[in-house]
Amino acid sequence: MINSNKFLFLFGIGCCQMSREIYYRFRSSQKEKPDIHTKLMERYSEIPAWWFYSLMALSIVVSLLLCTVLKREVQLPWWGLIFACGMAFVFTLPISIITATTNQTPGLNVITEYAMGLIMPGSPIAVVCFKVYGYMSMAQAVAFLSDFKLGHYMKIPPKSMFLVQFVGTIVAGTVNIGTAWWLLGSIDGICSDSLPPDSPWTCPNDRVFFDASVIWGLVGPRRIFGPDGNYGALNWFFLIGAAGPVIVYALHRTFPGQRWIPLINLPVLFGATAYMPPATAVNYNSWLLVGTVFNFFVFRYRKKWWTRYNYILSAALDAGVAFMGVVLYFSLTMQNKSIDWWGTAGEHCPLARCPTAKGVDLGDGVCPVF
C-alpha cells in the first residue's frame, strides 16, 4: 500500500519528470546524434531560420491589423490575439510529442473556447476568432511538422517542402475564401434551417462553428459550467486530465515490476472519447473491447506473429475501412438504400429515450417517472 505522503512526493516527482521530458526533447532536437535519415538529408541545405521568423512576424502583424482596423468585424482585441498565439506556442511542443508517439492529436478547441468565453462573455465572434488563432494555428503547425517528418523519411529537400507548404497554403486559403464568398452571394438560403434534409447546402461543418459561438460565446461557460449553470462538476475533469499521467508515473515507480503500467497512455484514452458523439455506444464499446483484447495478446505473447506483422495488420484494417466506405457509397448511398440490422438499430437501450424531467409520464410502462 502507498501512503498519502509518498503519493504526494511521487506526484511532485511526476510533474518534474514530465517537464524534464519535454525540455529534454526540445534540447535533444539540436544536440542528439544524427540517425541514418538525418545523415542522408545532410546533402541538402537547411531552411534558413529567418524564413520561419519572418513568416511568423508577418502573420502576427497582419492579424494585429485585422484586430485593430476591422475591430467591429473581428471583435477580438489585440491582447486576445497575443494570448491565443502564446497558448498555441506553449501547447505545440507537448501535443507534437503525443502525436509523434501515439498518432493521436489532442485538440485545444474546448480550452480556447472556455478561456475566451470566461474572459469575454457575450462575444461569439471574438470566441470563434480566438479559437482559430489559438487552436487551429497549433493544429496546422502539427500538420506541417508531420509533412516535414514524411519529407525527412522520403529524402525530400527541406526548402522544397517549405515552398510547397507555403504556396499550397496561399492557394488553398485564397480558393476557399473566394468559393465561400461566391456561394454566400449566389445561393439563396444557404446554410438555412428551412432547406430540405437532402440539400447539399446545409453546411454541417460550418454549423459546428456556429454552435460553438452560441454555446461558448453568446451563452458563455459561466452559465453552463459556472455558478449559474448545472454542469459545474465537469470542471473537475480538467484536474483529472492533468493529474492522470502523473498518477500513472507514480504507480510505475511504486510497482516497477508491473510492465503493463507504463503502457497506459491516458492522453490517448481520454482523447479517444472525442469520437464518441457521432458514434453509438454499441460501436464504440465494440471498438474498445476488440482493441483491449488485441493489445493484451500483443503484450502477453510479444514473440508471436501478430507482433511481427502489427503495422501491416493496422494498415490492412485502415485500408479495409476505406475500401468498404467507397463500396457502400456506390452500392447503397447513391441508390438511396440502407441496411437495417442489429448494429444499426440504435443503442438497444429503451431507457435512453426516456425523459429525465420530474413528473413526466409517457404512459408506456417502460420509462420511469421521477
Image (cartoon, helix red, strand yellow):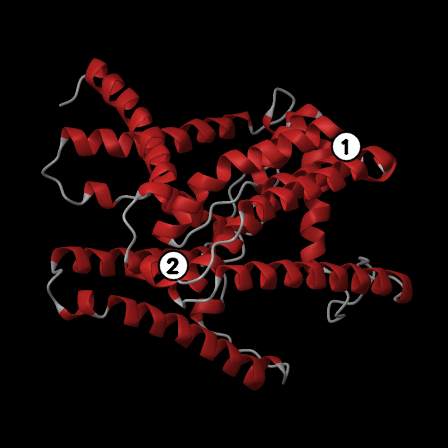
State the residue at coordinates (33%, 31%).
18
Relative depth, front residue between 202 and 246: 246
Residue at disc 1, secondary structure: loop
Looking at this view, is 9 or 285 the one in front?
9
As drawn, is 256 to the left or to the right of 127? left
Q: Is residue 157 left or right of residue 109?
A: left
Q: Residue at x 23, y 22 (%)?
A: 10
Which label's residue is closer to the chain start, 1 or 2? 2
Q: Position of residue 284 (x, y in %)?
A: 41, 57
Q: Nearer the viewer, mark 1 or mark 2?
A: 2
For image coordinates 26% across by 34% down, the residue present is 248
In the image, farthest residue toward the top: 5
Point 31% across, 25% down: residue = 16
Mark 1 Cα within 10 Å, few/some/many (few <14, many 20+)?
Answer: many
Q: Give the residue type at disc 2.
A: Glu
Residue 276 makes an appearance in the image: no
Q: Which of the 4 image quarters holds residue 74?
A: top right
313 or 86, which is in the foreground? 86
User: Residue 123, labelled with which disc?
Assistant: 1
Describe residue 220's horizontal placement relative to residue 248 as left or right: right
Residue type marked 1: Ser
Q: Is residue 242 above or below residue 178?
A: above
Q: How many marks?
A: 2
Question: Where on the picture, by quarter, is residue 369?
Answer: top right
Q: Quadrant of the N terminus?
A: top left
Give percent across and percent down for residue 190. Answer: 83, 62
Q: Is residue 336 visible?
A: yes
Does 300 sit left or right of 173 as displayed? left
What residue is pinned by disc 2? 42
**Vertical order, 361 against 347 (above or below):** above
| Picture quarter with the C terminus | top right
